[in-house]
Image (cartoon, helix red, strand yellow):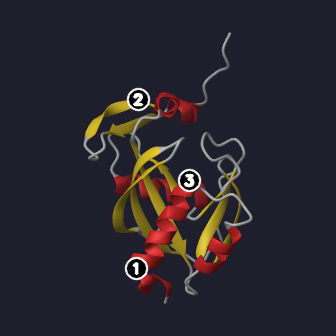
Amino acid sequence: MSAPVSASAQEMVQIVDRDNRKLGAVPRFLMRRQRLIHRASYILVYNRAGEIFVQQRTTTKDIYPGYWDVAAGGVVQADESYEQSAVRELAEELGVVGAPPVSLFDHYFEDAQNRVWGRIFRCYHEGPFILQAEEVADGRFMSPVVILQQSQEKSFTPDGLHILQRLMKDYPGLWM
């Protein structure tokens, strides 16, 4: 007898092709098992000092468990827009409402575990945050430079680091 599949593993996820065109929807566990290209929202939460709220993923996450992440966010569900996903994920993971995410760019990332088209957002919020216990173990604000230094010693999500490096190169005004 196999183990029961969690509710999050059953959620229907938007599947896309390499050009980010919709192909259909499958349960999250199947998307992970087959390494299908999907969509995700990534929301970088800044404070007035230009620091980013970095969160540690719980060890029960289906990808990059226990890693630190520069963005709140998650998979775009079937029939959900990137924007709807961003608002939902901010509220679920950090308890943030009323801080509208601003879209910056779309970004493709691929590694051995993950193939994803992400829409990158930013928003401003000073906290306090209400961390979702099932997904977020810890969190704190850090400057981008400190994040890159810490990534030499601690595990950070590779997609998040890739996004941060692109932001620092292409959007230097965000840190002012």
Gap in angstroms between the C-alphas marked 3 and 1: 27 Å
Toward which corner of the image does residue 129 lie, by quadrant?
A: bottom right
**Residue 163 % position (x, y):** 47, 65
Which amino acid is tagged 2? Val
Which amino acid is tagged 3? Glu
Gap in angstroms between the C-alphas marked 1 and 2: 35 Å
Q: Residues within 10 Å of mark 3 (few under 14, many from 20)?
A: some
Horizontal side, residue 134 vs residue 163: left or right:
right
Q: Which mark is residue 92?
A: 3
Q: Residues within 10 Å of mark 1 (few under 14, many from 20)?
A: few
From the viewer's perspective, is residue 38 above or below residue 86? Answer: above
Who comes first in sequence, dot 3 or dot 1? 3
Closer to the eye: label 3 or 2: 2
Circle 2 residue: 26
Q: Is residue 130 visible?
A: no
Horizontal side, residue 67 vs residue 32: left or right:
right
Secondary structure beneath disc 3? helix
Q: How many marks?
A: 3
Q: Is residue 104 visible?
A: yes
Circle 1 residue: 171
Q: Residue at x 65, y 62 (%)?
A: 55
